[in-house]
Image: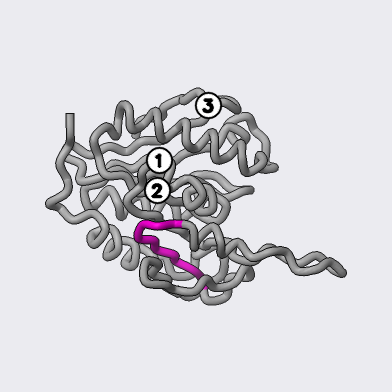
Amino acid sequence: METLYIDTPFGTANAHLNSTAEPRAGLVLGHGAGGGVQAKDLVAVAGVAHSVGMSVALVEQPYRVAGRRAPAPARQLDAAWTAVIDHLLAGELHGLPLVVGGRSAGARVACRTAEAVGAIGVLCLAFPLQPRRRSGATPAQSRLPELDAVTVPTLVVQGTRDQFGMPPATERRTVVQVAGDHSLRTDLGSADDAVRAWLLRVVPESSATRTS
């Protein structure tokens, strides 16, 4: 595992890269709003992707690297994420098909920036579909438009008891329900199986060729 320290417009981000000798693709994953890249589902999925021949980067946003728990505004998250991916595509992941994703807030960032970074697929772990409603407040707007805006194949792995709701499946979007809540810790095995099958469909071995 190699840690890369990458400058972004909003501070230094860390990318923890687990490369493979002959990668079929690259997978870049982001963490949730209040958590880090040590989340059990992120670590498990990163291992699955590496086992099927992908180089995997787990990205820590600058606010986390700086020791803050409160997430940065969406525009800053998106800009920092894009800067990290540009760096990886110019170097360590150069010439590889790219899949992006993350858990919770990290999945939202991946969806919003998928087109800009040229991703061929988006992997969402515990997508936070409906924000929590505060007592006496009107319901917050659903985040479904962020998912719907993605034009490439998308996998959502969602706990059946996720307090943020269940996104609908579409022609491009596969939704796999697993036992558990937003943490996805209850049935990591089923989540891993779903991710492995989806990755092998989205990144066929025949496309695993580096370009110069």
- Residue 152, image x and y in percent? 36, 57
Q: Which residue is mark 3?
A: 8
N-terminal of the pair, mark 3 or mark 1, is 3
Q: Which mark is residue 59?
A: none
Q: Element type at marker 3?
A: strand
Quarter of the picture containing the N terminus is top left
Q: Element type at marker 1?
A: helix
Q: Which mark is residue 100?
A: 2
Q: Which residue is mark 1?
A: 117
**Magenta run includes residue 104:** no
Q: Residue at x 53, y 26 (%)?
A: 8
- Image quarter of residue 200: bottom left
Determine the CA span between mark 2 and mark 1: 9 Å
**Of the two numbered discs 2 and 1 in the rendering, the one whose residue sits closer to the viewer:** 1
SS assignment for the magenta stretch, majority: strand
Q: Element type at marker 2?
A: strand
Q: Which residues are magenta?
A: 150-159
Q: Residue at x 26, y 44 (%)?
A: 97
**Of the two numbered discs 3 and 1 in the rendering, the one whose residue sits closer to the viewer:** 1
Q: Residues within 10 Å of mark 1 (few under 14, many from 20)?
A: some
Q: Is residue 88 above or below residue 206?
A: above
Which residue type carries mark 3? Answer: Thr
- Residue 187, image x and y in percent? 44, 70
Query: Do the residues under discs 2 and 1 have CB atoms within 8 angstroms?
Result: yes
Q: Residue furthest left?
A: 206
N-terminal of the pair, mark 2 or mark 1, is 2
Which residue type carries mark 1? Answer: Val
- Image quarter of residue 91: top left
